[in-house]
Amino acid sequence: MSSALSRRHLLRQLPLAALAGGFHIHARSQESKQLWVTGNPNMDKAREIAVNLLKPTQAQIEHAWELHFNSVVFESYGFAPRCAIDAEAMNEAIKSGASAAEITDLRESMSMNRNATNERERKEFLDAFHAAGVTCIFQNTGEEGSDPMRLIKRLAHFTKATDLLKPALTKVTTAEEIEGLKKAGHVGLCFTINGVPLMQDWESVSDELRFVRIFHELGTRMMHLTYNRRNPIGDGAGEPHDGGLSDFGHAAVAEMNKLGVIIDVAHSGWKTAFDAAKASKKPMVASHTTCCGVYEHFRGKPDDTIKAICDTDGLVGMCCIPRFLGGKGDITALMDHLDHVIKKFGAKHAAIGCDTAYISRYDKEERAKLMKAPAGSSGRWEHLWPKDEYVTTLEAEQSVAWSNWPLFTLGMIMRGHSDDTIRQVIGGNMLRVLKANTVA
């Protein structure tokens, strides 16, 4: 669809956006006032905060809505809207003596795929997705670590959702499928996991890496090399000493390149990420990070590492976590980080990977009904974070809420970025990297 479309034509062509709160089709004097209002108080409060921080003109809002809802929006890393749990079913499991691990798995399954079996949650899920104007998310379908059995659980949860909700929600593996979703008015998930699946038998390199192919066959198209902690591939962002990519890590990078799995170093240490970029023969990413050149944080990336990633023809996606963004941690801070990438490294290397999710407005009331569940494990290994005294605010968190995606486009318009630049950042760049990694 051409960017030159008039707003009147857009309103005729996008009833789905109107349904989801993207537009209110009344008299022109009314429809031009608050395009961002959805009728969902949870979304609208967050949007009101962001609008008040940005202070746009009406013309800028209208420009943003037309550009955003006309574009393929492909989030470089994040989470689909989360469903409310079923408190009655959870309580039955607790009463039956389910273990803490079983309760955790049940809770995760409900939050990730109850939209497939409950009409209220299905509507809430799809309305949120369309109100955000997101076409596809590179969805985290793994758990932190490298154990294939640990990684496969969330992959199963989201496979169920996409199996039962298609065509409204579809699992995709190619850029062409994502472009097709946009034309059809549907949405999709492209799967990523928080680790490279490793057998941990250590008999041979090829044996150790054989599950990379298996997960690729299951639809996984991106993998974290590390997640905060050290593993046989390299060091995570949370380690105090970063030794870089190991010899085995070089083999893992080569295998991922060969099979068509995008290398993600969002949670890797700075040297490990730099080494991986030097080793990769395909475009790679730090899918949800920040720029240390704006605010230094261990989960961000310094300029030399960002440049190395860009030199692969890859990208860095800016996340929506206030403590990683620094400063006020709000939507204006997010714009500062995007500006840094665009102006210093080029528009083709910037993306947005929120790393946050919209949560069903019905979840709070369901959780209030829960019985006390058996206690789970504490002090999980991946949560050994370096000390961080940053204090966030509710205003900052709400201003970068996942459902505020159209306002990220608005913020870039207000920073003077061209429509072509914005189209690249909100989806075009991630499409390009996915295409470049696809193996026929």
Image: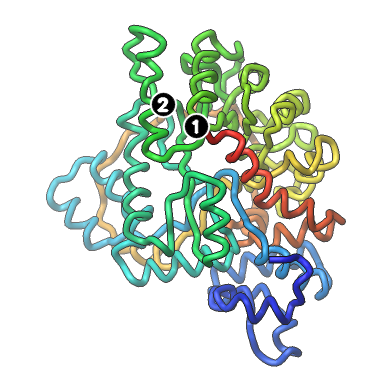
Q: Looking at the picture, does residue 59 appear above or below residue 329?
A: below
Does 35 sit above or below residue 403? below
Residue 107 appearing in the image? yes
Which residue is rendered at x = 47% and y = 51% of the image? 189
> Neighbour class for label 1 at 10 Å: few (<14), some, many (≥20)?
many
Q: Which residue is mark 1?
A: 223
Q: Residue at x 66, y 79 (%)?
A: 11
Depth check, front residue: 383 or 85? 85
Give the mark toward the camera: 2 or 1. 2
Q: Residue furthest bottom?
A: 27
Which numbered disc, 2 or 1, marks the residue that appears first in the sequence? 2
Q: How was the colour assigned to the protein in this rendering? A: rainbow
Residue at the spot of label 2: 212
Instruction: Please tell me whether residue 356 is drawn above or below residue 326 in the rendered image.
Output: below
SS under mark 2: helix
- Residue 216 in percent (x, y) is at 42, 33
| Label of residue 131 in the image | none
Marks 2 and 1 in Cβ contact (< 8 Å):
yes
Q: Quadrant of residue 246 in the image? A: top right
**Dot 2, how many residues are within 10 Å of its Cα: few (below 14), some (14-19), or many (20+)?**
many
Classify residue 310 as left or right of residue 398.
right
Residue 125 lies, in percent from the top left, at 44, 64
- Viewer-side residue, 15 vs 38: 15
